[in-house]
């Protein structure tokens, strides 16, 4: 909750929850309550979750891994990150990631400046429960590509592997 002095307080379990491409995303801070400075998203990603390689033109993405193991690709580099790791993916560099192992990963994603959080809102749907969504079919690629253009990023190829 934003306050009159510019501070934000949000109790555990609070925030707008969205089912996004098989994951659970909770918006913790948005541009509307950070003066456009950043958006903060908590994510629970199922094993095998892997967005396609993409490049953001407007924001940097910073990930703090709370649980699980994720393999990141950034430019020509590939590296693993586990709980307690921080990963910064700068704008204008192609990147992606995949969740390793048999358990979901949980992370915080900070986007700076704010705005990308609204991509997740538009591409996803309000979560009916604070859990991973039931299995669904493939994403609506036309919608995904349209929203990518709207939010000033480009999809550069298929996911590194299909989720298991």
Image (tube, helix red, strand yellow):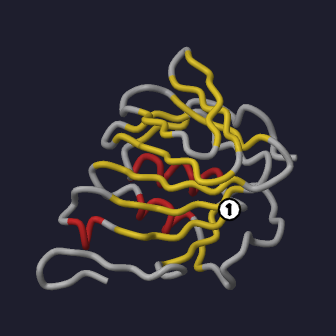
Q: In this view, does 27 lie above or below 154?
A: below
**Farthest-out residue, top:** 76
- For the point 33% across and 43% down, the residue is 59
- For the point 42% across and 46% down, the residue is 149
Q: How crowded is mark 1: few (under 14 residues within 10 Å), some or many (20 or more)?
A: many
Q: Is residue 142 above or below residue 7?
A: above
- For the point 41% across and 43% down, the residue is 61
Q: Identify the secondary structure beneath mark 1.
A: strand
Viewer-proximal residue, 58 or 17? 17
- Quarter of the view holding residue 17: bottom right
The x and y percentages for residue 100 are 77, 40
The x and y percentages for residue 163 are 81, 46
Viewer-proximal residue, 77 or 140? 77
Residue tagged 1: 23
Q: Is residue 86 left or right of residue 152?
A: right
The x and y percentages for residue 78 are 62, 21
- Quarter of the view holding residue 136: bottom right
The x and y percentages for residue 55 are 46, 33
Q: Is residue 109 above or below residue 95?
A: below
Tell me the quadrant of the picture where the N terminus can be found. Answer: bottom left
Q: In this view, does 24 lie to the left or right of 164?
A: left
- For the point 30% across and 48% down, the residue is 112
């Amino acid at each position: 909750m934003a306050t009159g002095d510019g501070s934000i307080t949000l109790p555990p379990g609070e925030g707008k929850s969205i089912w996004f491409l098989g994951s659970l995303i909770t918006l913790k801070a948005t541009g509307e309550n950070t003066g456009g400075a950043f958006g903060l998203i908590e994510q629970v990603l199922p094993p095998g979750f892997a967005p396609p390689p993409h490049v953001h033109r407007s924001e940097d993405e910073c990930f703090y891994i709370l649980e699980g193991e994720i393999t990141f690709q950034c430019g020509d580099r590939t590296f693993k990150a586990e709980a307690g790791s921080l990963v910064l993916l700068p704008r204008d560099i192609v990147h992606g990631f995949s969740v390793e192992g048999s358990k979901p990963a949980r992370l915080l994603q900070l986007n700076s400046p704010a705005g990308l959080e609204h991509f997740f809102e538009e591409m996803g749907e309000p979560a009916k429960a604070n859990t991973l969504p039931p299995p669904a079919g493939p994403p609506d690629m036309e919608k995904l590509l349209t929203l990518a253009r709207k939010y000033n990023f480009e999809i550069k190829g298929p996911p590194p592997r299909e989720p298991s």
